[in-house]
Amino acid sequence: MPKYDERSNKRRAEMQSRQLEESMSLERRIAIAQSRERGTIDEFYGPHREALQAEIDNLNDRLTEKGVKAAIYRRLYGSRDRKQLDRSRETMRSIDERIGERSDAFDSRAFTVKQNLSTRHDIQRENLEMDIESPSVRPRSRETSTADMVVSGFREPPRQSSKERSR
């Protein structure tokens, strides 16, 4: 049964405040990084994408234009324009795919970082509750806490070599 005395509640509230601040800080850092990533994508692909879209619009207009001149032009150059339009659309799809891949990779990294923080917070809460319930058992030092091991990718403390054990 969890303890709800004043000291225990204060410790829970302090940890909850700290964890909330960490979560909000992470969200801010992710938002800033996402904005930078979008800027980089726009800087890299933007000019080419805009020129390509203008070319697609121009070719569409030429191929759908009405009138005698347009009909003659289509008769002479229509197949060339259709091929160019197909190539331009394919290039546009390729650019959009690359942009999507970069965005997906960013989202995946952000999700992983959020999951790691959430896992660390869960472990910290469990450790706090165990400490509150059995004060004789003290939590491990900051360097080897279970929460830090999970976030850094370790599942258990590093093993000592035989030289270190013999000292």
Image (tube, grey):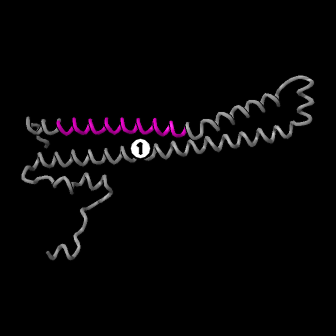
Q: Tell me: 131 left or right of 103.
A: left
Q: Quadrant of residue 72?
A: top right
Magenta portion: prevailing SS class: helix
The amino acid type of the residue labelled 1 equals Ala
Placement of 57 over or under 33, stated as above or below: above
Dot 1, how many residues are within 10 Å of its Cα: few (below 14), some (14-19), or many (20+)? some
Q: Which residues are magenta?
A: 14-41
Horizontal and vertical percent position of residue 125: 21, 44
- Residue at coordinates 10% horizontally, 54% vertically from top-left? 137
Q: Secondary structure beneath disc 1?
A: helix
Horizontal and vertical percent position of residue 146: 23, 54
Q: Locate the N terminus and report the quarter of the image it occupies.
A: top left
Which of the two residues, 156 or 158, is positioned nearer the viewer here?
158
Q: Quadrant of residue 143?
A: bottom left
Which of the two residues, 120 or 34, is positioned nearer the viewer here?
34
Q: Is residue 38 highlighted in magenta?
A: yes
Residue holding disc 1 = 110
Q: Is residue 36 highlighted in magenta?
A: yes
- Residue at coordinates 21% horizontally, 47% vertically from top-left? 126
Q: Locate the C terminus and report the quarter of the image it occupies.
A: bottom left
